[in-house]
Amino acid sequence: MQRSTKPLQLVYWNLQGNAQAVRYALEYFGVPYTETRKEISEWENWLKEKPTLGLDFPNLPYIVDGDFKLSESMALLQYVALKAKQPQALGGDDIDRIKVTEMLGVLLDVKEAIFNVLWRDASTDEAKRKENFVKCKEKFDYFGKLLGDKEFLLGYITIPDFFLFYMLDLVNLIDAKEFESYNDPIKNYYKKFANLPQIKAYRETEAFKSLPWK
């Protein structure tokens, strides 16, 4: 497998969606990358294109790094950590690696609930909206207890941190009042993460501002 010294390519729709946590990781670790953003109007073209890409599991988002290709957002997060030569971001020891897997599983449940509010039945059904927000709050309460006064979930940055920040950012965008109901550790974490120099600088760029979140 030949990996390129050139910037890796990230391919996704022209929105935050399942690629946003990956973008945050790329920016934080300073991994050079370019983006190809597809418009939703290109859906039919995408269906024709995907079997030809040489991906084991054709899907968006995916990355191309030399002749290496990879899809699925959780795998992409892991690859970014390795590409950046930051393997501790996958967990610094055996137990922390298991904890990283645990947290990612919980965050996938959170993502499903938040995406329901954004794009599915809960976007127009108030009862379903509340039900999904209740699910999110329960999970965020757990993360707040885990955090305590730590800067990051495990005391040092790992890939779930990028995912958690993105989920909190979505809730804050969708319903700031709901976000304010969260416990202090999780709200403090969100504010501190948003002010990390690499994250803050990225969120001020046109590349970030031009990405629709909904």
Image (cartoon, grey):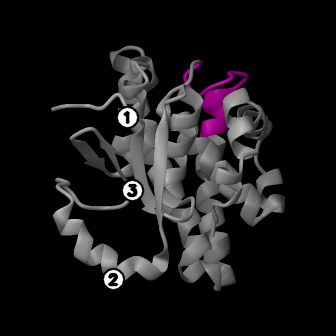
Labels 2 & 1 near each other (Cβ < 8 A): no
Magenta span dominant secondary structure: loop
Q: Position of residue 180 (x, y in %)?
A: 83, 52
What residue did someone put label 2 on? 44
Residue at the location (73% across, 65% down)? 174
Q: CA distance from mark 1 to mark 3?
A: 14 Å
What residue did someone put label 3 on? 61
What residue did someone put label 1 on? 78
Q: Position of residue 76 (x, y in %)?
A: 37, 42
The one nearer the camera, 67 or 156, is: 67
Q: Amino acid at mark 1?
A: Gln
Q: Specify the quadrant that holds the N terminus.
A: top left
Residue at the location (58% across, 59% down)? 135
Task: Decide whether residue 26 is among the magenta residues.
Answer: no
From which residue to which does the magenta span run? 143-155
Q: Amino acid at mark 2?
A: Glu
Residue 184 vertical placement versus 35 (above, below)? above
Q: Amino acid at mark 3?
A: Pro
Residue at the location (46% across, 82% down)? 41
Q: CA distance from mark 2 to mark 1?
A: 30 Å
Task: Decide whether residue 149 is among the magenta residues.
Answer: yes
